[in-house]
Image (tube, coloured by chain):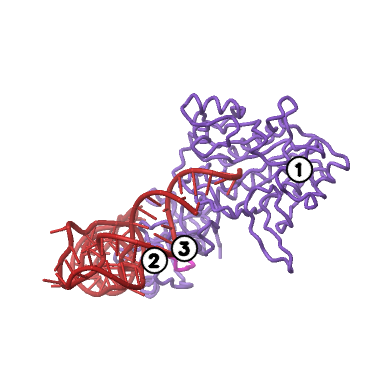
Amino acid sequence: MNKVFIKNIKEHVDKEVTLKGWVYSFRRSGKIGFLTFRDGFGLLQCIVAKNDIGEENFESVKKLTQESSVVIEGKVVENERALGGYEVIASKVEIIHISKDYPITPKEHGTDFLMNHRHLWLRSKKQHAILKVRHQIIKAIRDFFDSNDFTLVDSPIFTPNAAEGTSTLFETDYFGKTAYLAQTGQLYGEASAMAFGRHYNFGPCFRAEKSKTRRHLTEFWMVEPEIAYCDIEEDIQWAEDLLVYIVNHVMSTCKDHLMTLGRDIEVLKKIKAPFPRLSYSDCVDILKKDGFDVEWGDDFGSPEETHIAEKFDSPVIVHRFPSKIKAFYMKRDPENDKVVLGMDILAPEGYGEIVGGSERETDIEILLDRIKEEGLSQEDYDWFLDLRRFGSVPHSGFGMGLERVVAWLCGLTHIRQTTPFARTMGRLNP
RNA sequence: UCCGGUAUAGCUCAGUUGGUUAGAGCAACGGACUGUUAAUCCGUGUGUCCCUGGUUCGAGUCCAGGUACCGGAGCCA
């Protein structure tokens, strides 16, 4: 039999095909039924008529419920009235399994209910579209780095210490010792960059912060390139190029999914390089002028970030932050030692920080001082300091939060839908 | 952790100044219908009113504590 997927249905017009999948919905009207069929690739209307499939088969089809699994044989025809312009006139409907009382019915549901049924919610149109876009973003990220001679070098998930010494970590028992789940692969990335020149790691990160907002997950994916012989300017350039590449890739491969999600594509079309660049000090001036209560040296909260980002259509690059509010490994600006050569990229429309990066400090004495200042144990960082003892070079890198990029490009109000099984402060199930 | 809000049928919600038998729509189930798009029409059922305690002749409704969830803050990608 000619087994086909819905995505290729156009190529089989007037031919007999076999479809394997599930019932998305089923309406009956006497001797004819309209079965919206789902196969993981899309939706397709199948006409199930008594005259075509026979009385016995038609009787059994009456039992079909939402999400029952079926194998349908029939002929593909063009029809304007059908979703997508094509439909299948069934000649046989084989019931594989009858689904009973499927919980996600065609009506409104609350988010908590849907998240409790996430394993089933994934079958719904919008969730399916989001995860398809996520997949294409991941592909774009990997294509971008692979085609620019970066080597994917994985960083460990079990780590013996706090990498940045700032965030709260998940603790776990490691044969009697305490291990932590990695919050970043950053420090290991620096080791790889010295070995491979251009490195990236891409995997899950874990943060035990009790953040309860639409922008936070406790488990999320971050891509972190690290580049040897690279200054902050080149670092910014890589980040900008990556974002532009992702946006273009999504626009060319995911238009249908974005439509399904109701995303305003015109907004995404306005994203163009070069992105506006502002120093931290510029931002403080703007915020003060616009009535915010901030002083030079304060970290920005999300209302401040959103205010800056809303002034532009493209992501905004903010650079040269006060060293006190940034991680110990960021390099001081030689022209002003109160600031570091760090940068954040803020997504438009209030999606917040999607990239954070910096040129790294190479001076071992400064690093030792900074480790002391942060109250970190020098012993834990000894291997990291080796990177400054043996062929230290200027280098830079950044981290990009995958889920925030997915949320932004899909136009979602909450990050929890950007990942198959979201882990948040209040959710570990399913 | 802090501030604010919500909790009633499988789901989404209404429920008056505290009042006797707690409702609607959708879903489900049975039936009619050969072009439906969340079809329509007829019929059928549904409750730990979040939990514990209190006030009261009487609590879904008022009070206290707890729990869960939602939104925001801080923290951050």
Among the two numbered marks 3 and 2 on one chain, the one whose residue lies closer to the N terminus: 2
> Which lettered chain is shown in red?
B
Label 3 vs 1, first from the N-terminus: 3
Q: Is residue A421 left or right of residue A335?
A: left
Query: Which one is in front, A112 or A318?
Result: A318
Q: CB under 8 Å between callouts 1 and 2?
A: no
Q: Write down the chain letter for disc 1.
A: A
Q: Which residue is mark 2?
A: A52
Q: Is residue A242 magenta?
A: no
Magenta range = A65-72
Q: State whether residue A160 appears in this view.
A: yes
Residue sitting at 39 percent across and 74 percent down? Answer: A60
**For the residues marked 1 and 2, what is the alpha-carbon distance in whole angstroms?**
57 Å
Q: Are marks 1 and 2 on the same chain?
A: yes
What residue did someone put label 3 on?
A116
Q: Chain of mark 2?
A: A
Kindly identify the amino acid type of the residue bearing the numbered disc 3.
Asn
Chain A, colour shown:
purple
Image spot of residue B48 (x, y percent): 31, 72
The crowd level at tag 2 (other Cα within 10 Å; few <14, some 14-19, many 20+) is some
Q: Comparing marks 1 and 2, which lies closer to the viewer?
A: 1
Q: Pick the residue in front: A209 or A401.
A: A209
Question: Eyeballing the image, is B8 above or below A220?
Answer: below
Q: Nearer the viewer, mark 3 or mark 2?
A: 3
Residue appearing at x 59%, y 41% in the figure: A354
In this picture, is A129 found above or below B58? above
Distance Cα–Cα, label 3 vs label 2: 40 Å
Q: Residues within 10 Å of mark 3 (few under 14, many from 20)?
A: some
The chain to which mark 3 is attached is A
